[in-house]
Image: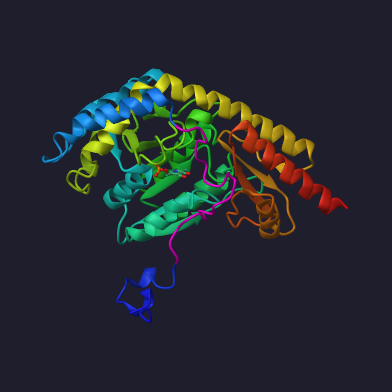
Amino acid sequence: MSDVRIDDLPVRDELRGKSPYGAPQLDVPVRLNTNENPYPLPEPLVERIAERVREAARDLNRYPDRDAVELRTQLAKYLTDTSGYQVGLANVWAANGSNEVIQQLLQTFGGPGRTAIGFEPSYSMHGLIARGTGTGWISGPRGDDFSIDLAAAEKAIAENRPDVVFVTTPNNPTGNAVPRETVLALYDAAQAAKPSMVVVDEAYIEFSHGDSLLPLLQGRPNLVISRTMSKAFGAAGLRLGYLAAHPAVVDAVQLVRLPYHLSAVTQATALAALEHTGTLLGYVEQLKAERDRLVTELRATGYEVVESDANFVQFGRFEDAHTAWRKILDHGVLVRDNGIPGWLRVSAGTPEENDAFLDAVRALKKEQSS
Ligand SMILES: Cc1ncc(COP(=O)(O)O)c(C=O)c1O
């Protein structure tokens, strides 16, 4: 059997020769490569999850609430409380991670014969999910400083007339935020060109110095804000992402979502986590302080750093980023090589993890300058 490979199967042409997405899951003492929250869930929340899941377990003979009404109501409350912009149940949709939210959006607004654009380097799953949904992918430009060059981006939208425009802010892997005015201009450009859906991926917004772009939803039915509980809520293992948009967008994604896609266990767990929002956002403040410390210390050591509004920092420049990645790994610290020439990315960990990382990069600097 092992002599049969993917490409020997009658797979779709666009999947031939491709490899699956995935950061290395190496067993090393300090793992700072996937932008996870380093703090385990607090014990009272673990207890509450157990309680809620126990209750849900009694009904597991039944399908879960297909519309996840209680969960969406609580997510809407969280968004309203933290942004001051009023959203309700009808504006919010949830799925298994924001990756699934993005997949549902591309199934709804992309697909064969349609295209989506992102400004790269950015979150590579946007392009991969586009491919998986048969949506053509257009790699839009970014400037040398990794900001979105508005004139170049507007030109790319006007020329390509994409059906879906992705704007990731704060951007992954570079960490920088996209100014509100740029997002507004891109939205206008996308409407003039097609009109198209604009998906603002705010996976890291809780770590930002600035505010969520949620209020931009007012009067913009083709705008979607995508969010996740994987980062700020420290619940990457939960797999819970969500979007906020005009109710018509929420209705539209119903056309493609699988029935009962969010298990009763997932809904119960997410609801428990939302009861502990205050505590979890406290960790976010600690992580923001640690992120700022990483920026300061990296600069003091002589590295270049992209201004970060996220829970990670892109730093460089290296003649050979992959060799630098390996040397940092030799110190027991796993960071991320996203294949951007000259740059690596480190996620903010606990103070002890960050100290280990800083020791490793200081040693690397010393070695390089001797
Ligand atoms: C920009 C961005 N969007 C979405 C995601 C996916 O998050 P989730 O765990 O909610 O699928 C990530 C994960 O790293 C991300 O970096």
Residue at the location (71% across, 55% down)?
A: 327
Q: Image quarter for residue 178?
A: top right
Q: Image quarter for residue 72?
A: top left
Residue 325 to residue 310: above or below: below
Give the magenta range: 19-40
Residue at the location (58% across, 54% down)?
A: 338
Q: Is residue 32 magenta?
A: yes
Residue 61 to residue 342: above or below: above
Q: Foreground residue, 116 or 58?
A: 58
Asked whether residue 338 appears in the rendered view, the answer is yes
Residue 88 to residue 362: above or below: above
Residue at the location (15% across, 39% down)?
A: 60
Residue 34, image x and y in percent? 52, 46
Main secondary-structure element of the magenta-colored stretch:
loop
Q: What colouring method underlies this structural image?
A: rainbow
Residue at the location (62% across, 55% down)?
A: 340
- Which quadrant of the picture is home to ligand 1? top left
Residue reaching furthest to the bottom: 3
